[in-house]
Image: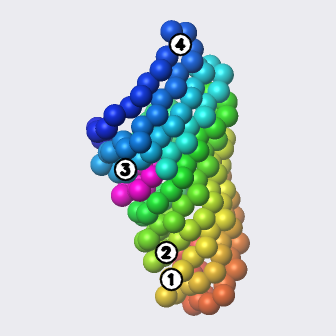
Amino acid sequence: MTGFRGTVDFNWDGKKKISFTSQKLESSFAVMNVDGAIEIEKDVKVVIQSDVADVKQGREFTSLILKEKFDFPEIRGHGIAEIKILGDYASPQIKADFIMAPGGFDKFEARSVSGLAEIAKGELSGLFKIDDPDMKGSLRLVSRPKDLNVKIHLDEGLVERIFPALD
């Protein structure tokens, strides 16, 4: 796993409230601006603005700190993102607004992907704009542990290159 470098301002009320902020927190997978508040056993609000070097490693770290195994396919890439971890302390939602170049999900690879994604209760949903020599358009995705639903709107694309990735 990774270590972190940077200054973090950390406050704790001695009971259940924690707040923290860092203008530049570096790891092997990202350089982040982090602002967060947690009330243990109640709620979480963390906002991360990040230059992401390795989405896959970031996902592994997130899974570890949230103590949650993500059952949806692998996400890959590097780029910039704003990530929000919000809601119930025991089961927060993760929301991401991002641009990755390149980017990938499961068997899909693209030169550039931008979009919005949300992870809640083991489900990944998102709307993505794809710019690639083999496909230009948008993709709506819902991935559950035993189900994947993808809707593709092609502006340009080679269907014979896209269908094998859905198998």
Q: Is residue 90 visible?
A: no
In depth, the one of 159 and 13 nearer the eye is 13
Q: Of the numbered discs in the image, which one, if any, rests on residue 112?
A: 2
Helix or strand or loop: what does disc 2 sit on? strand
Relative height, residue 74 to residue 167 (above, below): above
Q: Position of residue 46 (x, y in %)?
A: 56, 37
Which corner quadrant holds the N terminus?
top left
Question: The magenta stretch spans which residues?
Answer: 50-59
Rounded to the nearest whole Å, what is the CA distance between mark 3 and mark 1?
Answer: 26 Å
| Label 4 crowd bin: few (<14), some (14–19), many (20+), radius 10 Å | few
Do the residues under discs 1 and 4 have CB atoms within 8 angstroms?
no
Q: Which residue is identified by label 3?
A: 31
Q: Secondary structure at mark 1?
A: strand
Q: Is residue 25 magenta?
A: no
Mark 2 vs mark 3, CA separation in Å? 20 Å
Is 131 placed above or below 79 here?
below
Kindly identify the amino acid type of the residue bearing the numbered disc 4: Asp
Give x and y (percent) for residue 110: 48, 76
Q: Which residue is mark 4?
A: 13
Q: CA distance from mark 1 to mark 2?
A: 6 Å
Please report contact status of discs 2 and 4: CB closer than 8 Å, yes or no: no
- At a point 36% along the width and 58% down the height, the residue shown is 53
Q: Which mark is residue 132?
A: 1
Callout 2: 10 Å neighbours few (<14), some, many (20+)?
A: many
